């Protein structure tokens, strides 16, 4: 608590020095929180920008910080988590959920004897993508991350905020649903 009082006083009396002190003290904490939320979907530059946004937000909020309500560490932790979630949601919206059909298998179109084989495979892939997206969220995202991007259940659980065993159960159930949906088609 004494450290928070000193830090808050520095933020008020010498804002630039206070900001550097706050960053020196809590950079590891804030970076870890943001990184754990975003590492699987964003490059390091975007993660670092989010970390900077957290400190900038708290710096601008410094006149409203009430140490009776909580520590600066807890404030930074909450803001870091919220900013990371906001960035995740924004980036998720900008990522095209429709996976290019050609990329489902890099060699998919390499060995066709005829055009009809190519058209047939293309149609099957479209049906597969439609079936996956029909599962809804978070199921379709789990399937895409697990089987298309080859992410582990542990990594998926960190991104989606679900338990690892929940990811495993959902992926197993989704595969069974896909088998039923696609029965006789593929």
Image (cartoon, rainbow, N blue to C red):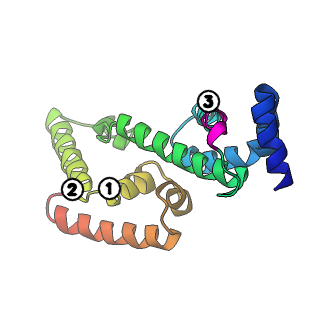
Chain-order first, disc 1 or disc 2? 2
Tag of residue 140: 1
Along the line of sight, the residue nearer the viewer: 142 or 32: 32
Q: Residue at x 37, y 34 (%)?
A: 94
Q: Which residues are magenta?
A: 55-64
Image spot of residue 74 (x, y percent): 67, 55
As helix, strand or loop, the secondary structure at mark 1 comes to helix
Q: Is residue 108 above or below residue 68?
A: above
Q: Which residue is mark 3?
A: 45
Chain-order first, disc 3 or disc 2? 3
Q: Residue at x 65, y 37 (%)?
A: 63
Whole-number angstrom distance, CA of label 3 to CA of label 1: 28 Å
Along the line of sight, the residue nearer the viewer: 55 or 167: 55
Tag of residue 102: none
- Residue 154 left/right relative to 74: left
Q: Tags 1 and 2 in contact by the CB under 8 Å rule? A: yes
Q: Quadrant of the N terminus?
A: bottom right
Question: Residue 173 appears in which quarter of the rendering?
Answer: bottom left
Question: Residue 17 appears in which quarter of the rendering?
Answer: top right
The prevailing secondary structure element of the residues shown in magenta is: helix
Q: Residue at x 76, y 45 (%)?
A: 26
Q: Which residue is mark 2?
A: 134
As helix, strand or loop, the secondary structure at mark 3 comes to helix
Chain-order first, disc 3 or disc 1? 3
Residue 40 seen from this side: no
- Residue 88 left/right relative to 8: left
């Amino acid at each position: 608590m004494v450290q928070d009082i000193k830090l808050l006083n520095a933020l008020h009396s010498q804002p630039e020095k206070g900001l550097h002190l706050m960053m020196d003290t809590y950079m590891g904490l804030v970076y870890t929180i943001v990184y754990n939320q975003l590492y699987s979907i964003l490059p390091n530059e975007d993660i670092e920008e989010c970390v900077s946004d957290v400190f900038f937000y708290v710096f601008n909020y410094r006149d409203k910080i009430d140490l009776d309500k909580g520590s600066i560490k807890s404030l930074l932790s909450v803001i870091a988590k919220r900013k990371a979630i906001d960035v995740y949601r924004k980036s998720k919206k900008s990522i095209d959920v429709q996976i290019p059909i050609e990329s489902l298998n890099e060699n998919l179109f390499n060995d066709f004897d005829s055009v009809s084989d190519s058209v047939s495979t293309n149609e099957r892939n479209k049906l597969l993508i439609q079936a996956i997206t029909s599962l809804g969220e978070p199921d379709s995202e789990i399937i895409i991350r697990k089987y298309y991007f080859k992410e582990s259940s542990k990594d998926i659980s960190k991104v989606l905020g679900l338990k690892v065993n929940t990811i495993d159960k959902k992926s197993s159930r989704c595969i069974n649903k896909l088998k039923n949906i696609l029965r006789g088609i593929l």
